[in-house]
Image (cartoon, coloured by chain):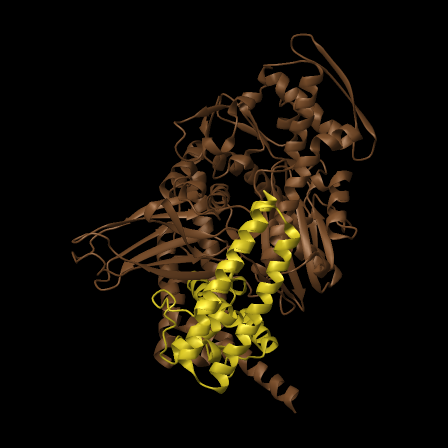
Amino acid sequence: MSTAPHQHRLAVGIDLGTTNSLVASVRNGISVVLNDEHGRAMLPSVVRYFADGSAIVGDAAQALQSEDPANTIVSVKRFMGRGLSDVGDISQLPYLFAGEGQGMVQLRTVAGVRSPVEISAEILKVLRIRAEASLGGDLVGAVITVPAYFDDAQRQATKDAAKLAGINVLRLLNEPTAAAIAYGLDNASEGVYAVYDLGGGTFDISILRLSRGVFEVLAANGDSALGGDDFDQRIYCWILEKNQLSALNPKDTRLLLTMARAAKEQLTEHDEARITAVLSSGEVVDNVLTLAEFESMSKNLIQRTLQPLRRALRDAKLSVDDVKGVVMVGGATRMPQVQRAVGEFFGQTPLTNLDPDKVVALGAAIQANLLAGNQGGDDWLLLDVIPLSLGLETVGGLVEKIIPRNSTIPTARAQEFTTYKDGQTAMSLHVVQGERELVADCRSLAKFELRGIPPMVAGAARIRVTFQVDADGLLSVMAREMSSGVEAAIEVKPSYGLSDAEIARMLQDSTQHAKDDMQARALREQQTEANQLIDAVRHALDLDGELLDQSQRAQIDAQIDALADALSSQDHMVIKRAITALNEATVSFAQLRMDKSVKRALAGKNISDLEIKQ
Amino acid sequence: MLDAAANHFQLFGLAQSFRLDTLQLEQSFRALQAEVHPDKSAHLSETEQRLAMQRSTLVNEAYQTLKSPIRRARYLLALNGVDTQEETNTAMPVDFLMSQMEWREAVVDAQRLRDVVALDNLESRMKQDTRELEELLADKIDADHDHEGAALLVRKLRFMEKLAEEIGSAYDEIDN
């Protein structure tokens, strides 16, 4: 019934990009991008909805995007975890927006209202199915990449999308860090590296120190609303101006944006690009754009990437001279003016030997293989950071920072607050993210209330607020009144996030026509999890069983047997309960094991110290 | 052993002093994270993942505390039952306060004139002064065991830390 302990577990890395998405996996020790049945690696991140509720994703949706622009969603990543006020000028976009501007943006399509999370899940689903077909089995999980500069709301939205697509998220991994893994492990590099990642819609800069198998991110910075799309937009505006066009319909807008992108791509290899199009009015557009013109109109976009570079270096307490190599990531770094500007900034030629479109997915796959437990002894350590400070609103709309940006994750920090009125029994907490001093200038992540504080004089209560950021860079917040022990805890899933209930509803909606399917899937998931857990516990018992006394051992064995019995049930809840029981039975064992391994780590170090001193 | 009772120095197998071997701190930190980081248990049970997160958080916290001189001093003094009184004790030698005011004005001027060279100079002088204070602090704690004197130096370093923050935001403002 159970699988062998060291069976290869199927895990993938997914680069969920603004313009294109990819899935990769480690096969026979080498990370490879998984192609579709036509041999195409990149899946355009384009989703088209139809009136019957169905959707198509990728090239087919992209090829005809100017046909039905309102129902063909491109660059949905820009909307993840974002409200209407963040999106900018919505009149420039061909979509119909739903809702009152509260929470994450919602798009009204012929198939109904869709959130960016649902739209992204459509893309992820296609990649999951591609991977399962290509690898020949169910996935244990996936590493999904996100821009390093994504805030909590954007990260949470990405994780929700993966959940909705039926993917177990092993880790959210920062895109530049994924690229560094692909590069670093390939070249056995040592020293400080900068990763300049200009994607379709996001810009990241990460400064990392690579040293004997440790990837330590020193600082990350960026702009989560700046990318190749903006260069297209510049060309588009130039076309409008050249031809004195105004107020185009969505179809023509989409057509010209597509032509603008083609011109941009042409200009990476040529000195000029011809742009021709026939608008729906019959009007003909026919212009020649020179590289010099393009460079001058996009100059300040490139300038906008240099400011985060300076900040990241300053945060890392390093200068340009300390940087040993610069890695270029993202399709937009193919533009010659970008390579030149980055080269001039760092005083060295940037590295481009890995395909900038694929390197993130390749690195994510390598990390997924490690996290799934396939790597064996030859592994490495990744120490990443949160990009933006986390804090609480205090008096006067000011932000009190609790966790500063560029803190290594996982991390936790507690701060004590007090009541300001006599007899105050509740305290509301407003969690924000950002660098500015005023709450109004930061991103609001969540508001919650601690109730049931015993009435005391003002200033007597001690309310301890703990922020915990996990290895995915996701925040949870807990508040506790210290004298009474009254507690309030939230996962920060907030103004822009989705509740678990909402996700459950979406899951149900998306499988309405296939309820049995969903049941079967839930059952299969629990069976897989149960088998994995039994393997893991048995493996741990083989290694460290001697840490347990007889009764502890008997208890765990009993729960393993109970779970093995539960596996024959057709009710996934029965299996789930048995999984929880086994998990609970192994808490203290896990603790003992970790203490042992820590002791081993320190013991090893002490021995080497002695050698140095002698 | 990684138990809650161990202090940060014990955690990394280091002697409890202000001066420390930063290379050894770094190596111990990496060795410990290699054992407890959540990436090592991503394929294991939820219990083990949660535990790993807690352990790894503790190791990160301890490392950050010992790596930063001001935090290390604060921590050492706390272990000795001394509160640095950074929020409550405002008594400060007049000449120190005067020089702080001059610093602030110079930063504001450099920002207003968008003078990056002046800001660079201020920053390197600020770093030099900070290093000198840290040297004094090391002697006060490790050699003289003068904890009250050390607490005053920590309060001075807190001023320097705020100054560093102001220089940082001046750079940002010039950049904008």
- Asked whether residue A233 is in view, the answer is yes
Of all chains in the rendering, the one displayed in yellow is B
Q: Nearer the viewer, residue A372 or A14?
A: A14
- Residue B41 is situated, as x and y percent measured from the top left of the image, at 51, 64
Q: Nearer the viewer, residue B5 or B167?
A: B167
When asked about the image quadrant of residue A5, the answer is bottom right
For the C terminus of chain A, the image quarter is bottom right
- Residue B136 is situated, as x and y percent measured from the top left of the image, at 52, 78
Q: Nearer the viewer, residue A330 or A583?
A: A330
Task: Give the residue at the far top of this rendering.
Answer: A282
Task: Give the residue at the far bottom of this rendering.
Answer: A614
Image label count: 0
* Residue ID at (36%, 70%): B85
* Residue ID at (59%, 50%): B110
Examine the rendered structure and indicate whether residue B110 appears above or below residue A258.
below
- The reply, left or right, for residue A428 in relation to residue A49 is left
- Residue A57 is situated, as x and y percent measured from the top left of the image, at 59, 31
Examine the rendered structure and indicate whether residue B175 appears above or below residue A606.
above
Q: Nearer the viewer, residue A445 or A534?
A: A445
When asked about the image quadrant of residue A313, the answer is bottom right
Examine the rendered structure and indicate whether residue A373 appears above or below residue A52.
below
* Residue ID at (54%, 80%): B19
Query: What colour denotes chain A?
Result: brown
- The reply, left or right, for residue A227 in relation to residue A484 is right
- Residue A301 is situated, as x and y percent measured from the top left of the image, at 66, 36
- Asked whether residue A137 is in view, the answer is no
